[in-house]
Image: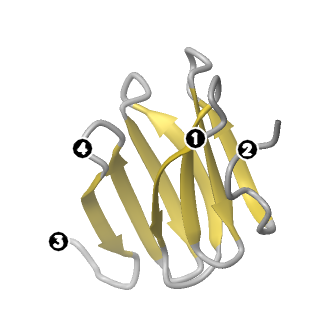
Amino acid sequence: MQFEDLSKAFSCLDYSHDGHLLCAGSIDGSIRVFDVETKKKLFCTRHLNAVNALGFMHRYTKIISAGGDNCIKVIDCETQKLNLNVDSKVTLS
């Protein structure tokens, strides 16, 4: 059995530390999160351009990603919502 909807070319992958979740970043800008046991897609979000890097953080309840759109995103896996979106072109002071 293959992972549902993982036929697109992906640029990066990460497993949660407990092995229950897999996140995949694609060259089309999508970030897909899967249940490893059932191989079903739990949710999907996206960058405007390719996903360059991603990984689980904060006890694997959040995913941080960097995209070709010069944005860094933090996604909450429990609520499936965007927690933070930072455009790297913006200077913080």
Secondary-structure class at tag 2: loop
Residue 34, labelled with which disc? 1
Comes first in the chain, label 1 or label 4: 1
Q: Are marks 3 and 4 in contact (CB under 8 Å)?
A: no
First in residue order: circle 1 vs circle 3: 1
Which residue, given by chain and number where applicable, does mark 2 sit on? 3
| In-front residue for pair 48/33 | 33
Secondary structure at badge 4 equals: loop
| 3D distance between C-alphas at marks 1 and 4 | 15 Å
Q: What quarter of the picture does the N terminus occupy? A: top right
Q: Residue 48 carries which label?
A: none
Q: Reading the chain from its start, which is encountered first: label 2 or label 1?
A: 2
Disc 4 crowd rating (10 Å Cα; few below 14, some 14-19, many 20+) is: few
The residue positioned 55% from the left and 14% from the top of the image is 18
Quadrant placement of the C terminus: bottom left
Q: What residue type is labelled 4?
A: Thr
Calculate the distance from the C-alpha at mark 3 to the C-alpha at mark 4.
Answer: 30 Å
Dot 1 lies on which element?
Answer: strand
Q: How crowded is mark 3: few (under 14 residues within 10 Å), some or many (20 or more)?
A: few
Q: In this view, does 79 lie to the left or right of 30?
A: left
- What distance separates the C-alpha of mark 1 from that of mark 3? 37 Å
How far is mark 2 from mark 4, CA to CA? 22 Å
Q: What residue type is labelled 2?
A: Phe
Instruction: Give the mark toward the camera: 3 or 2.
Output: 2
Question: Sequence-wise, which precedes: disc 3 or disc 4?
Answer: 4
What residue is shown at x 72% (from left), y 54% (from top)?
Answer: 12
Vertical placement of 62 versus 72: above or below? above
**Amino acid type, callout 3:** Ser
